[in-house]
Image: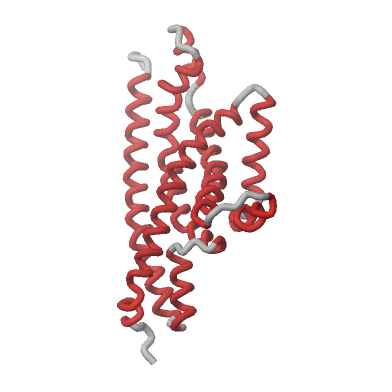
Amino acid sequence: MELFNPEVVQDYGLVFLHGLAITTMLTLVVIVLSGILAIPLALARLSRSRGVRWPADFFVEFIRATPLILQLIYIYYVLPSAGLRLDPISAAIIGLTLNYSAYMSEVYRSGIQAIPKGQWEAAASVGLRPWLTLRKIILPQAIRIVLPALGNYLIALFKDTALASVVTVQELMFSGQIIAARNYQYFTVYTVTAILYFAVGYPSALLVRRIELWARRGWTKGRRSVAPSGA
């Protein structure tokens, strides 16, 4: 029997591509939403107010202490018993976004804390309010610092979208499972699935490396520009 069956690719090529499109869409939507929501979450964890900090701490620690697959199952299968029904795509986006927001908030938090306190003091000395200092001075530098880590989360998210299959989202992995269940051509189906993941994941990894180099050079230049002239 032929190990790799090209007829499977010919017959189910559109199904594979549809699954890849869903995977890519989930990745892009979730990484954008998570990148935005993680910022206020990180700021909440840095707040001096316990009423703001403790709920944020609890949320992050709860998400980190429970498996992503359980979170997805809970959102899609358990919440309907409480009257909240979501379609598979919405459930996957919400679950993945909550999970990655928690992890990325820690990245943002470390980036903000990496900025020297002297910059806060310098901004205050010229009359800038804390929120304006954060928005115009601190956050742009912090984001540049954490860009490489955020890029790595993008690659991880691309692979983690496979877990959306547990809530019946027909992304790439689930498409492969459906095809394999129909024709039992496991070697062909999962080889093609792996090739498609690699075809997107590897260029993304190369892009992340470029971003990392750019961020490192920009951070070095930024530090030189703010250094005292006699240093």
Task: Please identify the quarter of the rendering in which residue 220 is found.
Answer: top left
Rendering quarter of residue 60 = top right
Q: Position of residue 58 (x, y in %)?
A: 68, 38
Q: Residue at x 39, y 55 (%)?
A: 24
Residue 27, given in percent of the width and then of the height, sits at 43, 52
Residue appearing at x 44%, y 55% in the figure: 158
Q: Position of 67 compared to 218: left or right?
A: right
Identified at 43% across, 82% down, the residue is: 185
Question: Percent position (x, y) of residue 143?
Answer: 42, 33
62 or 148: nearer the viewer: 62
Q: Is residue 28 above or below residue 183?
A: above
- Counting from the top left corner in percent of width and height, residue 177 is at 48, 73
Residue 84 to residue 134: above or below: below
Most distant residue in the bottom direction = 1
User: What residue is drawn where x is 55% and y is 33%?
Assistant: 42
Question: Eyeballing the image, is 126 above or below 116?
Answer: above
Quarter of the image with the C terminus is: top left
Quadrant of the snapshot with the N terminus: bottom left
- Between residues 225 and 156, which one lies in front from this camera angle? 156
Q: Is residue 218 left or right of residue 155?
A: left
